[in-house]
Image (tube, grey):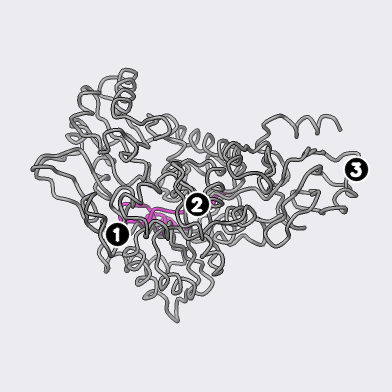
Amino acid sequence: MSADLLIAGGRVFRGLAGGFTEAVAVKDGRVMALGDDALAAAGAGTTRIDLGGRVAMPALNEAHVHLLPYGLGLDRVNLRAEEVRTMDELLRRIRTAAQDTPRGGWVLGRGYDHGELDVQRQPTASELDAAAPDHPVFIVRTCGHVAIANTAAMKLAGVGHNTPNPEGGVIVRKNGQLTGEFQERAMRLVRDVMPKPDQAQMVRAIGAACDHLASLGFASASDMNIGMSAGMEEVAAYDAARAAGRLPLRMWQVLAGNPEGIAQQAWEAGMRPMQGDDGLRWGAVKVFADGSAGGLTAAFFDPYLDSVGGGTGVFTFPDDKIHALLKLYHEQGWQLDIHAIGDAAIEQVLLGMEAADSEAHPFSGRRHRIEHCGFVTRDQRRRMKARGILPVPQPTFMYEFGDLYVKNLGHERSDHAYPMKTWLDEGAHPAASSDCPVCTVDPFINLYTMITRATNKGTVLGPEEKLTPEEAVHCYSWCGAFTQFAEDRKGTLEVGMLADIAVLSRDIFSIDPAEILTTQADLTFRDGAAIFDRHGEAAGAAAAQ
């Protein structure tokens, strides 16, 4: 019985434990053989991919991404710092978008970083008013925890000078006047009056986002806060996308669990933990504990530096409320995927998790997660490990925001942020991810950051936390599978595993780390079938049989 697919002619990375071999053969969607056995398994009907010195490895797993919002955002104003470095450019893009939008229609943007703008401050409502006087405007900072609305948007939301701060949110004022800035749960005041996408829009967005991730070497991903754009219609949109063949990635789905989310509604509608299959599984619920360190809303014990205003951040909920939510979702059987970045927020979450761990509902085997977990103490790491609570960090935060961390928090705290090597050595299985669209979803930037600990300005933070390329890929593949209870099926290229494989344009395990930044995925396979083929290699090889 010959193989369906043979990949040879370069190195094949099996996984951190297996190391390298020179060939992998695939049959019926799974790894059939490796090395000499793989070469011997090829027959007349086998599709052959010649690596030509490139490398093949387990396809990547994007363990924390907001896939539907990312897809929807592809049609919104791009304000990311790679392209927008001045306030004038930000406002020019808003002005151009307004000119292309019918009067009264919303102008939506995402991705600006005030720390990268020439003015080193947030935009204001009055500036957005001047750029788009006839449109409501709402732009979201790169972290997703701070947004700016113009006057028209605030009027539609019913927000005035005397509107009180909602629980877990801040409506920023200066000298008693609205600035247009909304932090954390206050952003819902505006989002609740924005038009909701319909199912056709969401299916297109899911498909576009999946196709882009496949082009980067991903065969698995997640959607980390489902229900915040269109409620339960997002669940239906995923089912529709799969039925239409627009869901090429394996998806681990995480329901929005804050009171404004859909977790309780989904439960009442009959949804249950682990419903679905490896292609589309509903496994977890997300709750927010704090904000972002770049946006000064992550909750810390020690304050931010005086030079940026001090303060200790924003808790999304008081202790009793978030602890009750964690207990509820834990006892319902969901995996907890809880957003906590600052050490004080991590402590709040850990105390709630520890209180929920009971004889009737034990934590053992549940693989609950703390998302981001950026500024974690030694004692918190110990307590997480004792209960099998996993960190799901974003090393690329260090690349994009590391210098801002230094500005906001100082060098010592920044050096110890996102301690990938420590977690790996302690057996914590850190699942590297991007939090896209907060950061770029480009995995090669993430891999580069894990290997070098360098920011995009060249600052090296905590060099003792550097990983080898093999360790970095392990965190980006097997560890993600582990958080999704799928490490027995994906994350390595051992015999019997699912044939989810990425072929890269360079052997990232043997080149200078700087070259990783310009590396690409040439092929991505799921179940041994190409879901991305940059140069038409798989199609050409199959046609030549």
Position of residue 470 measured from the top left corner of the image (x, y, whole percent):
65, 55
Answer yes or no: is residue 422 visible. yes
Position of residue 494 measured from the top left corner of the image (x, y, whole percent):
74, 57
Helix, strand or loop at label 3? It is loop
Q: Amino acid at mark 1?
A: Ala
Position of residue 189 measured from the top left corner of the image (x, y, whole percent):
23, 44
Mark 2–mark 1 contact, CB under 8 Å? no
Q: Which residue is mark 3?
A: 43
Q: Residue furthest bottom?
A: 359
Q: Which residue is mark 2?
A: 453
Q: Amino acid at mark 2?
A: Arg
Q: Nearer the viewer, residue 507 or 479?
A: 507
Q: Which residue is mark 1?
A: 299
Who's the residue at 33% across and 25% down the image?
89
Who's the residue at 26% across and 56% down the image?
304
Residue 77 vs 23, above or below: the answer is above
Q: Earlier in the sequence, mark 2 or mark 1?
A: 1
Position of residue 85 measured from the top left corner of the image (x, y, whole percent):
35, 31
Other-residue count near label 2 (Cα within 10 Å), few / some / many at <14 / 14–19 / ≥20: many
Q: Amino acid at mark 3?
A: Gly
Answer yes or no: is residue 1 visible. no
Helix, strand or loop at label 1? It is loop
Query: CA separation, marks 2 and 1?
Result: 24 Å
Residue 295 as seen in the image, left or right of residue 26: left
Who's the residue at 54% across and 62% down the image?
421
- The magenta span reads 251-271
Residue 461 as seen in the image, left or right of residue 177: right
